[in-house]
Image (spheres, grey):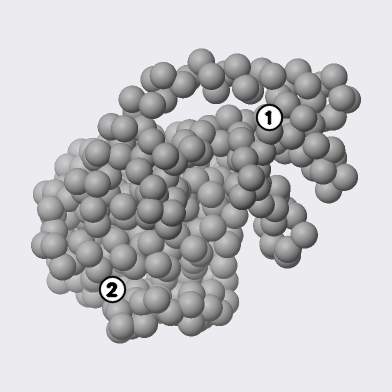
């Protein structure tokens, strides 16, 4: 199956092969790269993309594999494992076919002899624009290390991307790079991790991608301060062992009380991520045991009114700690309104 696809594709890639200096018959040997991740990716897209679109995405994969042929990552894996991982992150978010194709091709302009026109001819203008947009973002990042703190840079990044999908591909690219930082030299790690915390995490937050934001923050923390992160993780683990029962108990109590009051709400209890504990300790100069909010509960309700009622209810159950209650409900927030209370 894979072999026939490759055969069918090799013809249309002859231009690419010529440009890259291998003969058009030099189709990479089948199975030279972990087909398990490819198979997992194909499964992911088969679940939500129509067949013809899935086929296009698959074509982009083989194109990328051939374009990056012979290149490897530091881990020794074929380079295409990286764009494939990036596309898999986006497929898990059920992103559209163009975004996945752009993800698969995102390093092709930068790292191989292929140009924007080639991609346009093979996969259409839209995909070419996306890939070009991601490549340009890479340049911005490279040229402007000194603009780091720059909220400017954030704005620029968002503005530059005429298409929001460019940012999403870039975020997924960064996420995979952070997950595979491995052993780089200290300076490089510091630069990449710092940039991730200063620029990418806030963008993810602004886009409402909370899980991505938290992963950026924890990976950034681990890369910048490995020792501190390890100690913190151990402390949190020990604490959560003791308090798991307590969390369940509080969650039950909240759920029951909400139901009794006739409030439709979803209650989510979660462990705070490392970076938020770390930030708090730093900001308030507290030790781990003094930081109280290691767990958080989220109550999702339908209206602002319900939100206040729920807050009243929570406060009747648990007394707020003076000085530790704050609300952002009335300040403008694009993605969510929330009340924050600690007890
Ligand atoms: Mn990349």
The percent coordinates of residue 317 (x first, y second) are 73, 26
Please indicate whether residue 316 sits to the left or right of residue 179 in the image: right
Which quadrant holds residue 309? Answer: top right
Residues packed near mark 1 inside 10 Å, few (<14), some (14 to 19) or many (20 plus): few
Where, quadrant-wise, is the N terminus in this rendering? Answer: top left
Residue at image mark 1:
318
Whole-Å distance between the Cαs marked 1 and 2?
56 Å
Residue name at image x 23 percent, y 53 percent? 225
- Front one among 81 and 66: 81
- Front one among 192 and 231: 231
* Above-or-below relation of 128 to 214: below
Q: Which of the two discs, 1 and 2, labels the residue nearer the N terminus?
A: 2
Residue name at image x 11 percent, y 62 percent? 185
Which quadrant holds residue 257? Answer: top right
The percent coordinates of residue 13 (x first, y second) are 31, 63
Which mark, by number, is residue 110? 2
The percent coordinates of residue 137 (x first, y second) are 40, 75
Residue name at image x 64 percent, y 45 percent? 322
Residue name at image x 58 percent, y 60 percent? 207
Please indicate whether residue 191 sits to the left or right of residue 306 in the image: left
Q: Is mark 2 within 8 Å of ligand 1?
A: yes
- Contact flag, marks 1 and 2 (Cβ < 8 Å): no
* Above-or-below relation of 46 to 199: above
The percent coordinates of residue 10 (x first, y second) are 29, 56
Residues packed near mark 2 inside 10 Å, few (<14), some (14 to 19) or many (20 plus): some
């Amino acid at each position: 199956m894979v072999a026939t696809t490759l055969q069918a594709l090799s013809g249309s890639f002859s231009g690419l092969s010529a440009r890259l200096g291998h003969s058009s018959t030099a189709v990479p040997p089948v199975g030279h790269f972990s087909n398990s991740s490819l198979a997992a990716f194909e499964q992911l897209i088969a679940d939500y993309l129509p067949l013809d679109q899935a086929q296009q995405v698959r074509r982009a994969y083989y194109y990328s594999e051939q374009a990056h042929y012979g290149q490897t990552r530091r881990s020794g894996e074929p380079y295409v494992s990286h764009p494939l991982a990036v596309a898999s992150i986006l497929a898990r978010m059920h992103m559209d076919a163009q975004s996945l194709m752009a993800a698969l091709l995102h390093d092709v302009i930068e790292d191989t002899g292929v140009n924007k026109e080639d991609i346009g001819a093979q996969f259409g203008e839209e995909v070419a624009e996306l890939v070009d947009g991601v490549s340009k973002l890479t340049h911005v990042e490279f040229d402007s290390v000194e603009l780091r703190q720059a909220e400017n840079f954030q704005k620029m990044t968002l503005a530059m991307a005429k298409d929001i999908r460019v940012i999403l591909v870039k975020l997924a690219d960064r996420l995979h790079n952070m997950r595979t930082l491995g052993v780089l030299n200290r300076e490089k790690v510091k630069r990449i991790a710092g940039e991730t915390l200063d620029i990418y995490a806030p963008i993810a937050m602004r886009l409402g991608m909370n899980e991505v934001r938290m992963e950026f923050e924890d990976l950034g923390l681990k890369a910048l301060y490995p020792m501190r992160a390890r100690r913190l993780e151990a402390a949190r683990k020990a604490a959560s062992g003791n308090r798991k029962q307590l969390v369940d108990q509080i969650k039950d109590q909240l759920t029951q009380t909400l139901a009794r009051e006739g409030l439709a709400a979803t209650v989510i209890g979660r462990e705070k991520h490392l970076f938020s504990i770390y930030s708090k300790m730093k900001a308030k100069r507290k030790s781990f045991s003094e930081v109280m909010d290691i767990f958080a509960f989220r109550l999702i309700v339908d209206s602002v009114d319900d939100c206040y009622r729920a807050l009243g209810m929570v406060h009747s159950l648990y007394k707020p700690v003076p000085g530790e209650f704050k609300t952002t409900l009335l300040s403008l927030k694009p993605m969510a309104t929330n009340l924050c209370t600690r007890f």
